[in-house]
């Protein structure tokens, strides 16, 4: 089951709300329906629980029985669809009128003014045309409309809730979307998907931790490569001096460091200082190795 459907099922588990919020939620579902007019209402969903929720909501608010039909997947479709269809013009007109000038028109007038009613509308829209990516892969929540006016209206409602959604056109659809993880968490919380919002937060923590570990490992790998390259350069310098002038050419303290480096070509300076029983400090060893490299360069110039 997709993460989107998991979110929608969690939302559908909550039926207890005032009639004003139920009406606003239904309006959101209708605005994202495949057809919404005085002649026909058709709602399609890939999630059976959402289609059943839509059917029950219609039944509770208008006292009509609307069945949920299963449209089995064809060769072109990837999965079954669940349909709620009303083609009785009288019922369709009653529903449309209830939002335009009837008993729910006052509720629609409160959209953007009453936070609970506005969130109920967003909840309905998400159930109807929303999708969210699995947070383990990416952060992306979108609402996809066929009708531009409903897309603009929904974007305005989200703005009224102090969000800053983005919009775009994808083929023939008008998309309102978020890519910011914090905004997505807040939207999920607002529409009642508390468990999935917490799951997204957990996923983000794990992802951030994994990224920090990767960055640290990359940094440590880069430092190790740098240390090895410096050490190999020191070994080359020592071998060059020995081949041209002999080890005796170096002062006693440099000879001791040079011989130890040849025996331990990849050993870090801190470990060299420890192995040499404190005869030289880490900075003292580093200084002497740099002096050996300098002597080698001078010999090469001569």
Image (tube, grey):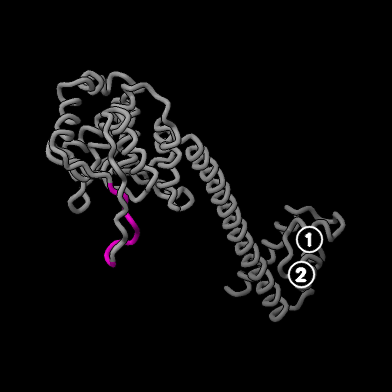
Report x, y in % for residue 254.
77, 65
Numbered mark located on residue 264 in the image: 2
Q: Residue at x 49, y 51 (%)?
A: 136
Mark 1 crowdedness (10 Å alpha carbons): few <14, some 14-19, many ≥20: many
Depth check: give the residue in front, 148 or 165.
Answer: 148
User: Is mark 2 in CB contact (under 8 Å) with mark 1?
Assistant: yes
Residues 259 and 227: in front is 227
Q: Quadrant of residue 103?
A: top left
Relative height, residue 240 to residue 150 (above, below): below
Name the residue nearer the viewer: 178 or 85: 85
Q: Residue at x 62, y 67 (%)?
A: 229
| Residue 1 relative to residue 106: left or right | right
Q: What SS does tag 1 mark?
A: helix
Q: Is residue 240 above or below residue 105?
A: below
Q: Position of residue 110 (x, y in %)?
A: 25, 19
Measure the C-alpha gap from mark 2 to mark 1.
8 Å
Q: Is residue 84 left or right of residue 230?
A: left
Name the residue at 51% across, 44% down: 204
Q: Which mark is residue 4?
A: none
Mark drawn on residue 272: 1
């Amino acid at each position: 089951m997709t993460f989107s459907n998991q979110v929608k099922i969690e939302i559908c588990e909550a039926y207890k709300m005032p009639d004003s919020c139920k009406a606003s939620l239904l309006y959101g579902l209708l605005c994202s329906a495949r057809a919404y007019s005085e002649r026909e209402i058709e709602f399609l969903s890939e999630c059976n629980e959402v289609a059943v929720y839509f059917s029950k909501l219609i039944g509770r608010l208008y006292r009509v029985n609307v069945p949920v039909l299963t449209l089995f997947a064809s060769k072109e479709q990837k999965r079954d669809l669940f349909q709620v269809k009303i083609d009785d013009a009288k019922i369709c007109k009653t529903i449309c009128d209830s939002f335009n000038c009837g008993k729910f028109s006052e509720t629609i007038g409160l959209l953007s003014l009453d936070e609970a009613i506005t969130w109920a509308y967003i909840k309905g829209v998400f159930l109807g045309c929303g999708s969210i990516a699995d947070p383990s892969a990416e952060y992306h929540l979108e609402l996809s409309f066929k009708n531009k006016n409903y897309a603009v209206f929904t974007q305005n409602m989200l703005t009224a809730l102090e969000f800053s959604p983005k919009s775009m056109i994808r083929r023939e659809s008008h998309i309102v979307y978020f890519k910011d993880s914090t905004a997505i968490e807040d939207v999920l919380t607002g529409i009642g998907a508390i468990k999935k919002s917490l799951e997204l937060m957990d996923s983000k923590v794990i992802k951030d931790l994994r990224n920090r570990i990767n960055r640290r490992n990359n940094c440590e790998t880069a430092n190790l490569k740098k240390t090895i390259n410096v050490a190999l350069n020191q070994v080359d310098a020592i071998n060059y001096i020995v081949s041209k002038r002999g080890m005796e050419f170096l002062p006693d303290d440099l000879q001791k460091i040079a011989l130890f480096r040849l025996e331990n070509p990849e050993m870090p300076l801190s470990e060299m200082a420890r192995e040499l029983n404190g005869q030289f400090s880490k900075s003292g060893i580093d200084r002497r190795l740099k002096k050996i490299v300098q002597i080698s360069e001078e010999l090469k110039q001569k």
